[in-house]
Image (cartoon, rainbow, N blue to C red):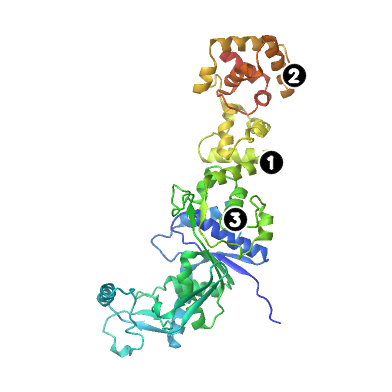
Amino acid sequence: MTEQKQVVTRFAPSPTGYLHIGGGRTALFSWLYARRHNGKFLLRIEDTDRERSTEPAIEAIFEGLRWLGLDWDGEVTYQFARQARHREVAEELLRQGKAYHCYTSAQELEEMREKAKAEGRPIRYDGRWRDRDPSEAPAGVKPVIRFKSPNEGETIVRDHVMGDVRFANEQLDDLIIVRSDGTPTYNLSVVVDDHDMGVTHIIRGDDHLTNAGRQSQIYAAMGWDIPEFAHVPLIHGADGAKLSKRHGALGVDAYRDMGYLPEAMRNYLARLGWSHGDEEIFSTEQAIQWFDLEHIGRSPSRFDFVKLENLNGHYIRVTDDTRLADETIALMKHLGLWDDGSNFGSDFRAKLIAAMPGLKERAKTLLDIGKGAEFLRAKRPIPLDDNAQKLLNDEARALLRRLLATFETRQDWAAGEIEATVREFADTENLKLGKVAQPLRAAVTGSSVSPPIFDVLATLGREESLGRIRDQAA
């Protein structure tokens, strides 16, 4: 009985920009699969494009993964630092006669392309140096190293998502594995790194499916085990078009800044192209328990902001009030929308926590909570929005003056007592409760929309509430 290998997955982004949402989903799928099987989830930075790879971009990838809650195992591997090892494998392929030096000039390659176009054939290298004696090489030309791809039969990629994908070998030309300047190319570097890192399962976008055919040939040539593949269809917009910035093709950090919770993003991304029956809302622990490769769909998934917002709203409603308050404060500060809260005193955080049950009820994002909590931060006399100004006409201000006189006789300022006082006042005035509550809300929050008004008054406290009413009743 053969010993089963430990599952090892990897996420291998190129640090040429932010961690985009598609990359975040790929990382999540790889992480979930590793965690389900008690395996390892490794991180490799493919930084061989030296002009475009930057330290800020690398840090953005780290931050995005940390925010999503995707922890990796062991040290980060940097591909550029392993170039000597990649060249070593290329030299081994040369020694075994499975690669060769190619001295074809740029002009000759252009002639090949033009001829293929004219004859309506796919553009492929014609293998002219494949079996040629290197002694015929032109003087002073630095050759590339090409992999000697099998030119008969077929290469089969056994894929957990796409099934068996077959490539006619005659359609896969001899790819360059080392450039003329000595730098290894992507397909060689990836194979060597995945082999050396012990990767058993490669989960990535289906735009790499053709690469899987080429890479499988290199694995076979070296006598290495070929990892299991799962090529995931790409994400499209809600309209079915290729995902763009208007659809949500943003960096993971942008979703953090829009006020989404990481657990909501994990739930949404897990459901984006993978399913477990009809389950829509599930915990990360459940996702780990359930995740498999066979239930990844073969069709592109559609990114839908409305669904994401609704899901995030659910997570906000079930999240601890103290955590929501702290995350809202941190986000609003990060975005430069709030100062340290000192304009409402040192007890601002406590008041925000107290107001949270009402604030989070209709909120879809942390930004909604922050916007809804502005009444806590406002300095007297508080600014009024257009709707509040319309509500506070002369009749309403006169009503507030009478209500203020009633409030000033009451010392108990709990929400229940405030509500009882307002209801009693409305009955005395022969008014429906809303006719009192709306101008009262406008006076103490500066808006026509707020959490439940009695909770708002209790959170603000007696003195602040009466002061705000007094300002508008004058």
Q: Earlier in the sequence, mark 2 or mark 1?
A: 1
Find the distance from the CA under tag 3 to the CA under tag 2: 49 Å
Disc 1: which residue: 320
| 450 versus 273 height, above or below | above
Q: Residues within 10 Å of mark 2 (few under 14, many from 20)?
A: few
Residue 284 image point, x, y percent: 66, 54
| 178 versus 426 height, above or below | below
Residue 174 image point, x, y percent: 39, 79
Q: Earlier in the sequence, mark 1 or mark 3?
A: 3
| Between 120 and 48, the one nearer to me in the picture | 120
Q: Quadrant of residue 360?
A: top right
Image point (65%, 24%), residue name: 453
Circles 3, 2 touching at the beta carbon (< 8 Å): no
Could you tell me the amino acid type at mark 2? Asp
Disc 2: which residue: 412
Could you tell me the amino acid type at mark 1? Asp
Q: Quadrant of residue 230?
A: bottom right
Q: Earlier in the sequence, mark 3 or mark 2?
A: 3
Q: Residues within 10 Å of mark 3 (few under 14, many from 20)?
A: many
Image point (71%, 24%), residue name: 415
Q: Quadrant of the C terminus?
A: top right
In the picture, measured across the screen, residue 395 lies left or right of residue 52, that is right
| 426 versus 127 height, above or below | above
Residue 164 image point, x, y percent: 53, 73
Could you tell me the amino acid type at mark 3? Ala
Under tag 1, what secondary structure?
loop
Q: Is residue 227 visible?
A: yes
In the picture, measured across the screen, residue 278 lies left or right of residue 134, that is right
